[in-house]
Amino acid sequence: MGAVRMLLPLLRAAAGRDGRRPGGGLLAVALLRCSSPRWTLVRPKPLERRLVWSEEAVSVGRAAVVRARPGAPGLLARSLVLQAQLLIQASRYEEALAAAEGSISIPDSHASSSQDAFSHLMRTLALAWLGRPDEALVAARHSVAVYRSAVPRRADRHLGSTAAALRAQAWVLGRAGRTAESVTVYFECAELLRSLPLWQQARLVLLESRVLAELTGGLRVLGRFGEGVEVGDGAGERIAPFAARFHPEARLLRAGLLIELAWCLGATGDLPRARATAEEAVARCRALHGSDPAVDESLLVLALECLAHHLDRLDAHAEERAVCEELVVIGERLAVTAPDAHEPGLAVALDSLAHCHAREGEGHAAAAATERCVELYRRAVRRDPLLYETELARTLANLSIRLRVTDAFDGAVAAAGEALSITRRLAESGGEVQRSAVTDRLRILGRARYRAEDDEGAAACFEEAETLLRELMAAGNPGPHEAGLAAAQSWLAKALRAAADGHLDAGRADAAVEALRRMKELTGRTTLTDVHAACVSAFARARDRDPEGVRQAWWRATGEPWPSFVYRTG
């Protein structure tokens, strides 16, 4: 290719301006050769430079078509599809789609089957990136079918392959949420690559790296962690060491594979190896960014998140905190230039760091980090409510808990109230999971109100939580809700006892008796020892503080004499 590049000035001179002379065809071929190198062991030139060559080839091809040069339509069609490939690499998807469709629509181009399949492969990728998965799948299936029936020519070897089309189809299925189908196609693609001769495998080393990394990720999503470990381990043996030297992208793919492998290892219970694999992924990402600062740090963020998770599971909390602090620093740096893309990730990092602070008893630091997290999620909700409202409600609930620890009770009540309001709205169409979340938010709001000495308000929250939990238990499996029900009843007993005391302090015997009556009814709904003990204590305190007043109030409220015994043993 170096010799071809050196000849470009001479070819341009021979072809004339815009390739008007007969030498334009030869110039276009040379430009295409420079923009799309065909040797696996040759490091490609920068993408910007190859795009310039590609655009010049398209311009020369168009001029040749206008002048009806022999073979000009075919040359233009090939120039356009190769330009589409480069435009996709440059994330210019609208232009890539136009170029790929333009290549297909040129009359009398006499394109080979491989070129037709490659054009539809480029359409697949462009349509998928543009958020049009249904159209992308149609193009992908057509590309696979044509590649399978094509008789490859030597000149078309660099125009994709059946394996490339299968990978694109699997990738689009994964983006469309059809992960099981995606994994099936990935397995077919991996098996096809494994069956190729060695010289073809060497040419497709990047493709194989991508397939194995994405397949491991798909298996993780499906919960098939053992298979994910098997594929991830096998990838290290399959991918040749030279790939990373000649293709920097292979190092990114290897790091991504290690991240997916670490998650799968952790899910299978092999935490030490999961930690080691995540640490290797972090080291590779650091090396990539150190050797080329232009490399995006997003992959490093994913590796650090994976490492922090496994450090937490291994109770390596000092190391976990250091990783969380680094994630916050990186997230803040990335969010400056691309807030829409990186602010949600920064919120996740702050949430993890707040958890570290809370675990160490650093209540004010935990609350401050959570407040920043909430603000970031508020901005994210304004951009995409469907995606981030659940996280906003969760972090508001966490904020309430952490403000309560710092005795900021008014703020705790406000945060819990907002979290409950959002969760109620989501529960209207969110099924049992969101309804269960409502009961959690009710208990958090109840505890905040209890600490703020709003005992009646707290009791109302715990009573509603108890009612909803009983409905959930009656409608399905009661097991997951038993602990929540016990907690709601215990806190309800505390709130009602405090409410009764408060009413007695203010001389409101009738209101105190109402709280005592609700407490006695609670003992009929539960066998919890602490609830019955709280009821005995509350009745005894009320009788001792205002024996005549509460007796009369009880008679007025119930028509019965003051109970002599309220502890139920059965």
Image: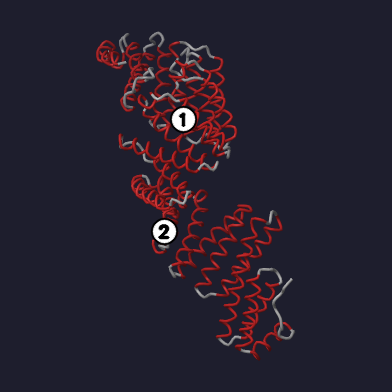
The residues bearing labels 2 and 1 have C-alpha atoms spaced at a distance of: 44 Å
Label 2: how many Cα within 10 Å (few below 14, some 14–19, many 20+): some
Which numbered marker is on residue 126? 1
x then y, percent, for residue 285: 37, 37
Label 1: how many Cα within 10 Å (few below 14, some 14–19, many 20+): many
Q: Is residue 496 above or below residue 24?
A: below
Q: Which of the two discs, 2 and 1, labels the residue nearer the N terminus?
A: 1
Color style of the picture: secondary structure
Query: Which residue extends farthest bottom?
Result: 548
Residue at 59% across / 69% down in the picture?
A: 491
Q: Quadrant of the N terminus?
A: top left
Q: Which residue is mark 2?
A: 357
Q: Amino acid at mark 1?
A: Ala
| Residue closest to the eye, 166 or 549 | 549
x then y, percent, for residue 238: 47, 25
Query: Left or right: where does residue 555 sit relative to residue 230?
Result: right
